[in-house]
Structure formats: structure tokens, C-alpha cells
Amino acid sequence: MSELLKERILVVLALLLCVAVSLLAASEAPDLSPVGIIYSDTGVDTTRSQTGKAGVKSKSITHSSVMSPRSSVPNKININTATQDQLETLPGIGQVIAAQIIEYREANGKFDSIEEIMNVNNIGEKRFADIRDIICVD
């Protein structure tokens, strides 16, 4: 086989691989993603679907249904009264960090400001920036 033919075969294979990746990305991509989040500023139900391992059913939680009744700020989660499930609806907050937030709250009392949540292990500036607009303290 000549070098030119080998090169052309490699180019064709590379193009086919690019097409396959593009088609995969365009079709059913949310099924491959572990977390899909849709937020809305309009106060309409906001849904977060969370899936674990392949084959595990997903759970959907709407922000309007998990809002603390004591929260005076609409569409925000009160980190002083939120349950584990409510905290897990926040982006980047899973079971472990939600439990750490509750443990911190029980050990230190209510949060005085939303910035205080950065005192919880595994919540730094980046994760705080992701949740700062959807949390509150009352």
C-alpha cells in the first residue's frame, strides 16, 4: 500500500470519527449526562433532573415545591431551613456536601449570611459563585 493511500485512509477515518462524535452529541445527549439543570427567573417551576448510575431511575425536583415556606425571597432556597433534598437541588451540591451543610448548621447555628456557607468543607469561591443567586438566609 502506498503512503498516499494510507494517508487518505487515515483522513477518511478521522472524518468519520468526527461525524460520529457530532451525531452522538446531537442525539439524546441528556441521557448521557449525569445532571441536567434548567433554571428560570420567571418563578415558573424550575426542574432539576438527577441521575445516578446507568439504569437508575432519575428523580425530578421542582424548586417551587422545595421552597421553604419561611423563605421571604421567591425562588431561593433558605440554607438555614432547607432539608437535605432541597440542598441537593443546588448545582454542585450532592448528598455529601448537603449533609456537611446540615452538620455545620447544627453545630454552629443559623447562617448569618450566604457567604458563611463557604465555611463548610468543599464549598469554595467557585461553588459559592454557582449557588449565590439561588440561596438565601432568613
Image (cartoon, grey):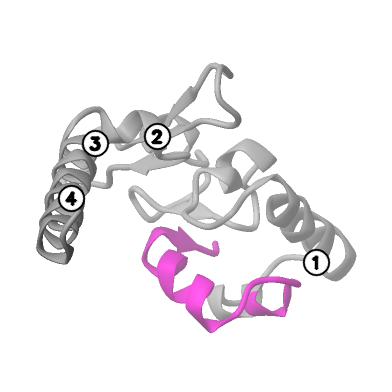
Is 125 covered by the magenta stretch?
Answer: yes
Residue 8's spot in the image, x, y percent? 10, 57
Earlier along the polypeptide chain: callout 2 or callout 4?
A: 4
Q: Which residue is mark 2?
A: 32
Q: Residue at x 72, y 79 (%)?
A: 119
**Label 2 vs label 4, nearer the camera:** 4
Earlier along the polypeptide chain: callout 4 or callout 1?
A: 4
- Give the residue type at disc 2: Leu
Using the image, tell me which numbered label, if any, was put on residue 24. 3
Mark 3 Cα-neighbour bin, 10 Å: few <14, some 14–19, many ≥20:
few
Q: Is residue 96 above or below residue 2?
A: above
Earlier along the polypeptide chain: callout 4 or callout 3?
A: 4
Residue 40's spot in the image, x, y percent? 21, 46
| Image: magenta residue range | 118-138
| Residue nearer the viewer, 122 or 1 | 1
Task: Check if mark 4's residue and mark 3's residue have beta carbons within 8 Å.
Answer: no
Q: Which residue is mark 4?
A: 18
Earlier along the polypeptide chain: callout 3 or callout 2?
A: 3
- Give the residue type at disc 4: Cys
Q: Which residue is mark 1?
A: 109
Q: Quadrant of residue 88?
A: top right
